[in-house]
Image: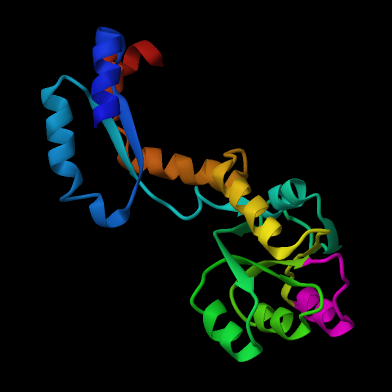
């Protein structure tokens, strides 16, 4: 709210209104109502409050290939449409890894190229992409299982910690051009954006914009 009040003070009438996005679902109703009322009292129009969605915060496998300068060992195609939402690190034994992986959703798993047990455990969970460090090739049975499940495998010439840091940077620089994100934005705007209020603030009517 402080940033919005500062923007209002600096821009005055030039600030037509604001959109608040990435709001956690549990805060969408009760917690945001007093925020909206407070800002409206300070003559800051709220055109939309958009909830946080996993899709909008996700990263495509294609983007990971670019950020990691990775080699695609298995490419099921459509890597621009395969989205990952979480990072998991495979550095434990296979049994512990499987329990750990089962708690995540649509994840990219980073593990050593020689950890065949972890690689197979990852492929039995909600893994959307497997990243192998140390530029080591997986075994034939891992490749075969990845082929069956259409899970891309990336190989990088980096250690695990550096790889994770690069992936986190990719999450911080999410792009919005992927078709699935464009569709998600359209859905969010249709559900939450007050188009008529913005048009009124602009001095427009539906007939004028037809």
- In the figure, is residue 196 to the left or right of 72? left
Q: Which residues are magenta?
A: 133-148
Q: Nearer the viewer, residue 131 or 78?
A: 131
Marker count (numbered): 0
Quadrant in the picture for residue 119: bottom right
Task: Classify the position of the C terminus by image quarter.
Answer: top left
- In the figure, is residue 9 to the left or right of 53? left
Q: Nearer the viewer, residue 51 or 65?
A: 65
The residue under the point 48% across, 77% down is 103
Q: Is residue 111 magenta?
A: no
The residue under the point 57% across, 87% down is 96
- In the figure, is residue 93 to the left or right of 132? left
The image shows residue 68 at horizontal and vertical percentages of 75, 51
The image shows residue 83 at horizontal and vertical percentages of 61, 57
Task: Classify the position of the N terminus by image quarter.
Answer: top left
Q: Is residue 47 visible?
A: yes
The image shows residue 152 at horizontal and vertical percentages of 76, 65
Quadrant in the picture for residue 174: top right
Q: Is residue 137 magenta?
A: yes
């Amino acid at each position: 709210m402080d940033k919005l009040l500062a923007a209002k003070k600096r821009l005055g009438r030039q600030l037509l209104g604001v959109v608040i996005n990435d709001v956690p679902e549990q805060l969408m109703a009760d917690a945001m109502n007093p925020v909206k009322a407070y800002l409206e009292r300070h003559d800051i129009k709220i055109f939309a409050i958009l909830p946080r969605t996993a899709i909008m915060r996700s990263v495509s496998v294609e983007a990971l290939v670019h950020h990691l300068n990775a080699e695609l060992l298995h490419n099921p195609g459509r890597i621009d449409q395969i989205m990952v939402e979480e990072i998991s690190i495979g550095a434990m034994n296979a049994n512990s890894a499987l329990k750990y992986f089962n708690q995540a959703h649509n994840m990219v798993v980073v593990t050593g190229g020689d950890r065949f047990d972890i690689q197979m455990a990852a492929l039995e969970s909600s893994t959307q992409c497997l990243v192998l460090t140390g530029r080591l090739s997986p075994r034939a049975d891992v490749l075969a299982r990845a082929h069956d499940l259409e899970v891309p495998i990336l190989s990088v010439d980096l250690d695990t910690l550096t790889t994770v840091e690069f992936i986190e940077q990719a999450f911080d620089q999410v792009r919005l051009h992927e078709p699935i994100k464009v569709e998600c934005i359209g859905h969010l705007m249709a559900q939450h954006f007050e188009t008529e209020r913005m048009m009124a603030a602009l001095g427009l009517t539906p007939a004028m914009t037809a």
